[in-house]
Structures are given as structure tokens and as C-alpha cells.
Amino acid sequence: MELRQKIRFCTPNRRVSALTIVPRQVSTYSLADLGREATPLQVDSDPIFRGSCEIDSDLFVPPVEAIVELANCRADDDGVRRFTKKFGPLVTNPDGTFVFRLGDWKAMQIQFRYAWNGFLGLDSRFPSAYVPLLKERAPHIFSEPMKGVMSQGRFELTPEGMAFVAESLYGTLLLVLIATHERGLLRHCSKPDCKNPYFIAAHPKQRYCTELCAEWAQAQAKSTWWKESGKQWLNQRSKAAPAKSKQKEGRKVDGAKKAR
């Protein structure tokens, strides 16, 4: 007998109670200037996020929309602040405190996007529009699609059933990503310059994240058809027009004769 057990993916409920952002400047030097006083090539902002969370006995089950927001989130001070206040820090210390650099958050987001693209057989290094051509011309540059991810945690029996309690929110979101992929709903918008390309499909044939992107695709298809077949269609229409006009004239003459 085969036993099918539905497992929920969750993490300890951590509600952000305090969050501050400390500005931090990171200077970049050339290799030739290392070890001596020199003017930096550039100064990048890499602020530090610090805060604390209230932890209770409840478990937090992230909504599936959380993986979409993590993948599409604008990785700047405001975007990361909004995400953290809404869902919590990606990684939290056992005592509920957290501290991370913006660069660390960006690195985890890139890893998350790479996992999403890997499930779809895409490669994060290249624009999605070029992937089919690259797979045809240079298949060796693509690794095998993502099959799974590592996440630390424990299994726990709850009143709602079996649950896997991941140690971090990030680990939970990775598991939700896997579960959504198993249902065949992960998508990457086919519009090349879409600002929020990661989405969950409402139906199996959905290729675009919004009606706006779908309308763009329809306009592109019409434009392509017009360039390739429009002149031929106009020529055929112009040839057919005289024949139709002659038929109409003949009908008018016949009608006049009948009236007489």
C-alpha cells in the first residue's frame, strides 16, 4: 500500500519588531593599487540591515506569493526593507536578532533566481530570449537543470498535519519553490524586458505574467506577420477587388432590367 502524505513547509513565526539600516561605503581599487595609497575606482553603497524579531510558538507558512516577491524584489534599500517587514529576514539568529549586508541579500536573491531558472531549464547568465539559440549552437555552456536544493530543519507533527520546519525563511521559500515546480506552475515571462518576469501560472499554457505583456506579444506577432506576409496579402486583395466590383455592377444591371 502506498502512503501519500501532504507536508506543509514552514518556519518559526518571526515578526519584525525593529529594523534599522546603517549606511556603509565600500571602496573598490584596482589590483595595481593594492598595498599603497590610491584613489578608489568607485565607491559602492552596501548598507547593513539590523533588527530583531518577536518569536512565538506558532509556525509561519509563507504564501506562495512570497517566492514571486523574492524573485522579483528590487534589490535596493526600500525594496529589501519592504520585503523584510512583510515576510521577515531571510536568515535569523536563534535569539531573534538579525544582521545582513545588502550585498548578502542580493547574493541570496541571485541564488534563488538561479534555482527558479534551473527548474525551467534556463540559465541566469543569459537573457531568456537568447537561451533557445544558445542551447542549439553551444549546448556545452548549460549545466543540468536544477533538481533540488538543500534546506536544514526538522519534521514536526502539527494539528494541521505533518510539517517540515525549516531553520530559515530562505530555506522555507526554497522548499515552496520546489513544491510549486512539482505542480508545473513556475514561469518566466516571455517578454524579454519584463521588469517582474517571475510568476506563477494560472493555467498550463500561460507564457506572460500580465495582460500587458500578453498584449505586447500579440502586437509583436502582428508586426512580424505584416512584415513577412503583409505585402502579399495586399496584392491578393487588390487583385480580388476588381473582380468583386464587376460582380456588383453585374448585379445592379440585372436588377435594373428586372425593374423595367
Image: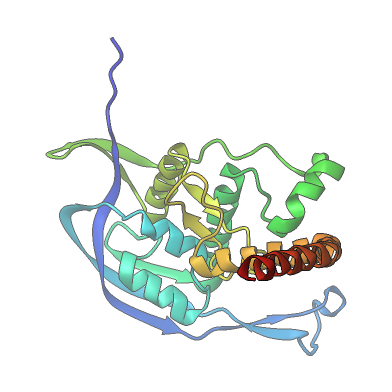
- Quadrant into which the C terminus falls: bottom right
- Is residue 71 positioned above or below 74 on the image? above
Asked if residue 126 shows in the view, the reply is no
Which x, y percent locates residue 216? 62, 69
Which x, y percent locates residue 235? 86, 64
Asked if residue 195 shows in the view, the reply is yes
Which residue is located at x 51 percent, y 80 percent?
47
Which x, y percent locates residue 91? 40, 59
Which residue is located at x 86 percent, y 63 percent?
239
Q: Which of 5 and 205 is in front in this view?
A: 205
- Is residue 171 positioned above or below 69 on the image? above
Which x, y percent locates residue 150? 48, 40
Please give the count of numbered marks on the rendered protein. 0
Left or right of residue 94: residue 145: right
- Quadrant into which the N terminus falls: top left
Q: Which residue lies furthest to the left in this view?
A: 159
- Is residue 4 positioned above or below 97 on the image? above
Q: Residue furthest front?
A: 260
Left or right of residue 86: residue 37: right
Q: Nearer the viewer, residue 14 or 227?
A: 227
Which residue is located at x 61 percent, y 45 percent?
118
Left or right of residue 173: residue 26: right
